[in-house]
Amino acid sequence: MHIAGRDRSQTLLLPESLDDYVGPDNPVRFIEAFVDGLDLAAAGFARVQARETGRPGYAPADLLKLYIYGYLNRVRSSRRLEAETHRNIELIWLLRHLKPDFKTIADFRRDNHNAFRPVFRQFVLLCRQLDLFGRELLAVDGTRIKAVNNKDRNFTRASLTEFITLADARLDDYLQRLDARDAAESGAGGSRVKNLAEKIAVLRERRARCKEMLAELDRTGESQISLTDPDSRAMAAHTHVAVGYNAQIAVDTKHKLIVEQQVTNQVVDMGLLTQTAEPAREILGVEQIAVAADRGYFKIEDIEACEQAGMEPYVPRPQRGPSVKAGLYRKDEFSYDPATDSFLCPAGQRLHPFSSSLLRGLKKINYANRAACRDCPLRSQCTGNQFRSVSRLENEAVLDRMQARLAKHPDIPDRRRETVEHPFGTIKQWMNQGAFLMRGLEKVRGEFSLTALAYNLRRVLNIVGFTELMAAVQA
């Protein structure tokens, strides 16, 4: 025999109160307490105060609870959230039987996208109150998340120029074939000539659109143009190139909690270190903190700004340049001596300043020793020219200090990777949020704030006991 179910027509004695269906340690009880304790007007939510006239609307607090629950449980679609309000007993309890339609739900996320970031920060402050941050090391990294824009609807200056060139060549070919058939007159059927004329018209129309987009790029100074989501950009992630956004996070290494997050359409990470880490340092309330990032963030101006903002950056120096490509001695194999303002080369010779120039507004000094290079037995391994020169920027001492820190703490790059990959892996795999649902940079930023909030909430629920968490939010 098998286990048999009950008769569907049988009368059941259900609990008299809906509250009996939700356990005392159910996460929805924390969502309720957390949102009720927020100052939604200060966060920037619209319609916090109900209007005295007109049809009553839904309270922003109720719709915010709905979204936090949805993102926490991998439900982000407004239509799916609407369906859950009809059948999910936890949501029925959380919303007190309210059943907003999908358009109301979607409009709330769209209209209040700027208010989700303050909500995320309030939860970070709650985590700080619970002493969940080590406040010693921040791991910074970025990931590419797909936008609502197919790569076929994204155009770069190079692709537009290439298409116009190919279109011109194809139009010439079509026109020559038409002229040849006009001369032969009876040599081709009318249908084939008509097909050629249609192809020419379509090609001319596409060429004209490409010319307009190229002119728009010239006017704005941008390098790309996207038609579905104008703010999105084509970004290379490993071997896959997709149109999306660059999501940046700063993660505290103690419990892998996200302290700061932002979304940008900048294709590369270079220059985003201080911009991401400085707000994290401020919200943690520390004067000094170590910040680790990968080689993609290596930019001397950004590293210097990071130091000036009260942080100790740890960014490995990438090996790049013509000497590296040629397999010759790298610049880091030449040791700089600040006492004599000279470089010691691998052959043991001193390189002294011989010229200077400007690079990005910074003074760049070039060092060389022509006489030593002339008879050096290692010259073939060092340069293909008559002598080798090594350059140094005026503020490059900041890189020397960082290199000394990396040598003293070689474990930090590994700690950074172990820390920052956890949130991205969770967000993309477990939370299934490898693509944005909204269009536009500002709306996408609001959406990612909800994602980061849901990730942190899930982590804290696993780390801290429910009773302690509720006591903190009710304090």
Image (cartoon, rainbow, N blue to C red):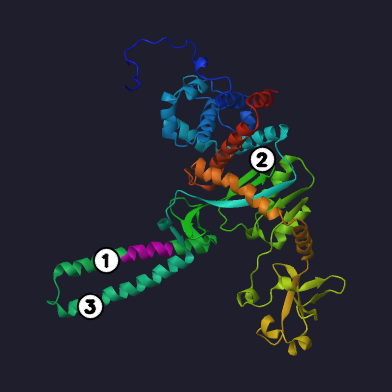
**Foreground pick, 162 / 462:** 462
| Mark 3 vs 2, N-terminal side | 3
For marks 3 and 1, give the CA distance: 15 Å
The residue tagged 3 is 179
Magenta segment: 203-212
Give the position of the N terminus as an image quadrant: top left
Residue name at image x 56 percent, y 24 percent: 26
Residue 67 at x, y = what percent?
Answer: 52, 32
Mark 3, Cα crowd under 10 Å, few <14 / some 14-19 / many 20+, is: few
Nearer to us: label 3 or label 2: 2
Indicate the quadrant containing the C terminus: top left, top right, bottom left or bottom right: top right
**Label 2 belongs to which residue?**
255
Residue at position x 72%, y 47% in the image: 137
Displayed quadrant of residue 205: bottom left
Secondary structure type for disc 2:
loop
| 298 in relation to 67, above or below | below
Residue under numbered circle 1: 199
Mark 3, mark 1: which one is toward the viewer? 1
| Residue 394 sits above or below residue 457 on the image | below
Which residue is found at the position 23% from the left and 69% from the top? 196
In this rendering, the answer to whether 320 lies above or below 44 is: below
Mark 1–mark 2 Cα distance, whole angstroms, equals 61 Å
Asked if residue 178 lies left or right of residue 7, the reply is: left
